[in-house]
Amino acid sequence: MLRKFRQLRPEARIALVEAMLLVSGIRILLPVFGLKNVRWILKPAGRALRAKPGLQAEEILLLLQAAARRCPVGSTCLTRALAGQLLLRKAGIESRLCVGVMRDQRHAFQAHAWLQRDGNVILGGSDEEIRQWSVLHGVDERTA
């Protein structure tokens, strides 16, 4: 793992560390403060981040997913979506956080979070998979 980390470009290494810190922090904060308050806590951080070109959205999201898989406190779709939105914002890329619900085959309530860009799902599943969810919450990046 360390060898792979060293092979990354410097900006990718920084993004990977930022992703790990964001996913960990958000994962810890969400159960304590809830979504609305965590978004409020993250809002100043998002405004303070300067757009830093160099990484494409796809690369940022791959680094985020790698960090989330290795996160010591675990991650959820919501932690990944919130962290992804913030990392994309830093790169000057707009996204939309969506939260949806459905009932599974056993009629149990399920919830899921994902990111969209230009109407396409970029994190959290495919466009086809997301169609089964009823969207409860979609927040434009500009209003987050």
Image: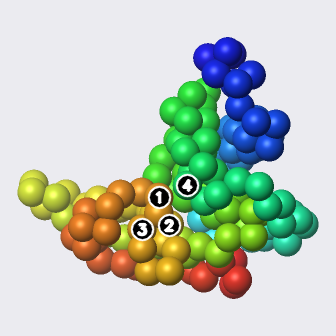
Q: Position of residue 76 (x, y in %)?
A: 48, 47
Secondary element at image label 3: strand
- Name the side, left or right, on which 140 lies relative to 131: right
Query: What amino acid is found at the position of numbered circle 3 in the picture?
Result: Val
Is 67 or 13 nearer to us in this picture? 13
In this rendering, is residue 113 above or below 27?
below
Q: Position of residue 121 (x, y in %)?
A: 42, 68
Q: In the rendered image, which residue does mark 3 sit on?
A: 121
Quick one: quadrant of the N terminus?
Answer: top right
Dot 3: within a 10 Å radius of its alpha carbon, few (fewer than 14), some, or many (20 or more) residues? Answer: many
Q: In the rendered image, which residue does mark 1 sit on?
A: 123
Residue 21 seen by the camera: no
Secondary element at image label 1: strand
- Please state which of the two labelled residues, at mark 1 or mark 4, is closer to the viewer: 4
Q: Earlier in the sequence, mark 1 or mark 2?
A: 2
Do labels 2 and 3 touch, CB within 8 Å?
yes
- Name the side, left or right, on which 17 lies relative to 131: right
Q: How many marks?
A: 4
Q: Which mark is residue 115?
A: 2
Is 85 or 134 nearer to us in this picture? 85
Distance from disc 3 to disc 4, alpha carbons, whole Å, reads 12 Å
Query: What amino acid is found at the position of numbered circle 4 in the picture?
Result: Glu
Dot 2: within a 10 Å radius of its alpha carbon, few (fewer than 14), some, or many (20 or more) residues? Answer: many
* Quadrant hosting residue 130: bottom left
Dot 1: within a 10 Å radius of its alpha carbon, few (fewer than 14), some, or many (20 or more) residues? Answer: many
Do labels 1 and 2 touch, CB within 8 Å?
yes
Distance from disc 1 to disc 4, alpha carbons, whole Å, reads 9 Å
Residue 85 seen by the camera: yes
Distance from disc 2 to disc 3, alpha carbons, whole Å, reads 6 Å
Q: Earlier in the sequence, mark 1 or mark 4?
A: 4
Q: Which mark is residue 58?
A: 4
